[in-house]
Image (cartoon, rainbow, N blue to C red):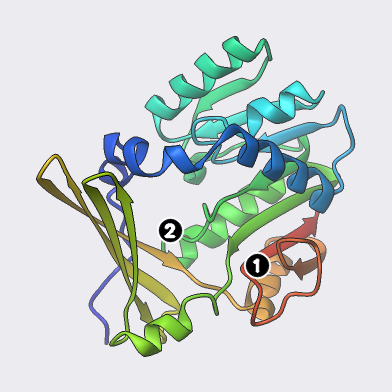
Amino acid sequence: MNPRQPHVDWDSLFGDDYDHFDLPDLTPELSAKEASDMVRLGGFEPGTTLLDAPCGHGRHANVLASRGYTVTGIDRDERFLSMAADEAREMGVDVEYHHVDLREMSFDAEFDGAVSWYSSFGYFDDETDRDILRRYRRALRPGGRFLLDMHSPYRHIPSVLANHEMHVDVLRRGADMAIDIQELDAVASRYYAEKITIRDEKVERARYSVRMFNAPEILEWFRTAGFSGARVMDERGGTFTVGSRRLVVLGTA
């Protein structure tokens, strides 16, 4: 039996090194495009109330608010929430930001739609993640829609098979480097990973794990969480295939 358990070094993964290595790629242009994708894939009508959970540093929530949506964003990271609120003020938009862990969401039929974007689901054990999915369902009014975006389970398998059962991503920022090493536990259907950053000649390590889902499995999770008519698609809204980059799920409350 694999002794490893779901775990995330939150503060290490989403601290200063995240700002240095990851934020430069999360451009305003990308955030605007992804916000448009959310609206299109979720079928969210202008003026509706949306829950962005987790919202991170508000890069989608603020764009959606600028387009006329009433947005509430929650996140466990107070630093991200401060960044989100600062940007909202700069943009002149109104977003309600709250310091809330996904595991403690207690909204009750308050939103027309909810989104979880950028592979933000599946970081806990299965019992906890199923409970989080039920909390998304309870947050929605009847007929509300939940849009979930995650990695395709097939995305890294060729690399894993070719590289001694590991997938390795390397990102450079000048002389600095971030190395992401992922090992797939096929029995648990979970990646166990370590991110090693080398910055100003200082080495930091952070561990995390994330659940992978195939289409029938995540649809069963949605059904047992109380969603109806759930369906899967690729990142463009087309048929999900083994070649798809993302697995997107849309469920109705």
Q: Is residue 196 left or right of residue 156?
A: left
Query: How far, Cα to Cα, is label 2 from label 1?
Result: 16 Å
Decide: few, some or many residues near mark 2? Use Cα within 10 Å; few <14, some 14-19, many ≥20.
some
**Closer-to-camera residue (180/175):** 175
Residue drawn 50% across the image and 36% down it: 56
Left or right: 45 as drawn, with respect to 179: right
The correct choice, above or below, for 238 with respect to 108 in the image is below
SS of the residue at dot 1? strand
Q: Identify the mark at residue 207; answer none if there is no mark.
A: none
Q: Give percent across and percent down for residue 46.
A: 88, 31
SS type, badge 2: loop
Q: Position of residue 17 (x, y in %)?
A: 28, 40
Q: Which residue is mark 1?
A: 247
Q: Residue furthest front?
A: 174
**Which residue: 56% across, 39% down?**
105
Disc 1 marks which amino acid?
A: Leu
Q: What residue is disc 2 on?
A: 123
Name the residue at 51% across, 15% down.
86
Q: Quadrant of residue 70?
A: top right
